[in-house]
Image (cartoon, rainbow, N blue to C red):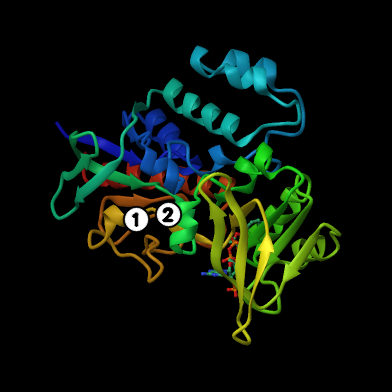
Amino acid sequence: MAEHVVIVGSGPAGWTAAIYAARANLNPLVFEGAVTEENRQDGTLPLGQLALTTEVENFPGFPAGDLSGFLTTSLDEEHRYLADMHHKQGVSGPELMHLMRKQASNCGARIETDDIVEVDFSNRPFKLKSLGGKEVEAEAVILATGARANYLGLPSEDKYKNRGVSACAVCDGALPRFRNKPLVVVGGGDSACEEADYLSKFASMVHMIHRRDELRASKVMADRVLNNPKITVEWNSVIDEVLGNDETGVTGARLKSTVDDSTRELEASGMFLAIGHTPNTRFLEGKVDLTPKKYVVWTTPFRTTTSVEGVFAAGDVADDYYRQACTAAGTGCMAALDAERWLASQGL
Ligand code: NAP
């Protein structure tokens, strides 16, 4: 028998959709993603991008404070280690995501730790296939697969991934290999500024590599970087090659000027990419309308409807503008309500 609603993805959008769908008695099935090496490399493991961050200061309801007692009583035994690791400064990304997952499960959502790799939206009920070989049918689908960090695409960058090359300063920046060493951050947006500022707490200095002579970041973030004595912006420069060796991984970077043909080398023990994101929509190509940047298109203003009736989208998979945990959660709620109302209108 077909599921009422299948939710694909396990960030704030997916779990909020699951909580609402479960409370509406739709018995939702969530595909939270698979735990594979490829997903780890791509930054697409279950629980999404927030699971790769540290403090979350802007999710309403979690002011600074000691949550360890709450985490002990709210999470399953297997996740209580989070309470022991809790830093007493408010909620962290991984804690917030485990709390959302637990809340969805408490409400009755069923969870598969598996990726959806193929969809057939040409007829209803829709058909979905998972990496693990599961085939499910669904009357309604909520897409909430989020987005992942971009890389430059250089072979030398690929060679040193996890050996000094990272797209998540807050996940990796505190590792011993980066401490008191010069580091490189690539990009000129808010993320690059945030990462450079964060890394300057551990590094001896941070070189921010930007391809233009002006930052894209908001003034407050740009000022933070420009006034930080441990950060130097290398203007009009791109990474020509990541330098390193098999023994130590990254040892530096060769920069190429964007205004003339000159190159120069910098010493660095790590390179952090902050050059934007790509939505996780590979499995949706040709199945539902996507923007030129491959985000799912919301077809009606202030609704989560897509080009396929009965398929809804929530969170960063359809939003390259706000990209916040609480906006993703908000659109997850909207998608569940839209799905519920659409199912009712179909008599399902
Ligand atoms: P972004 O604003 O798109 O910035 C990406 C940066 O990477 C740009 O400076 C871009 O250069 C550069 N870039 C892109 N591709 C490149 C390539 N192949 N080689 C070299 N450089 C490349 O992305 P973001 O910084 O991740 O921010 C995304 C959104 O999230 C924004 O709306 C931002 O305001 C928001 N955000 C907010 C905060 C905050 O408020 N705390 C923190 C993080 C993100 P160009 O400038 O030349 O295009």
Q: Where is residue 115 in the image (x, y as percent from the top left)?
A: 31, 39
Q: Of helix, strand and loop, which one carries label 2?
A: helix
Viewer-proximal residue among 9 and 326: 9
Measured Cα–Cα span from mark 1 to mark 2? 7 Å
Tell whether 153 sits left or right of 79: left
Tell me if residue 343 comes above or below residue 220 in the rendering.
above
The label number, if any, that marks residue 281 in the structure image: 1
Q: List x then y, in percent, for residue 108.
A: 38, 23
- Determine the residue positioned at 59% across, 18% down: 81
Q: Indicate which quadrant contains ligand 1.
A: bottom right
Identify the residue at image location x=71%, y=77%. Answer: 214
Mark 1 vs ligand 1: CB below 8 Å = no
Q: Please give the name of the residue rendered at 62% of the width and 87% of the height, measured from the top-left corner.
A: 260
What kind of residue is marked 1? Thr
Q: Residues within 10 Å of mark 1 (few under 14, many from 20)?
A: many
Screen quadrant of the N terminus = top left
**Residue hosting label 2:** 317
Q: Do the residues labelled 1 and 2 touch (CB within 8 Å)?
A: yes
The numbered mark, 1 or 2, whose residue comes first in the sequence reads 1
Dot 1 falls on a residue whose secondary structure is: loop
Quarter holding the C terminus is top left
The residue closer to the viewer here, 207 or 299, is 207
Expressed as whole percent of the image width and height from the top left, the position of residue 16 reads 47, 37
* In this picture, residue 184 sits left or right of residue 113: right
Q: Which amino acid does label 2 sit on?
A: Val
Q: Is residue 287 above or below residue 19?
A: below
- Rendering quarter of residue 109: top left
Lateral position of residue 346 relative to residue 13, left or right: left
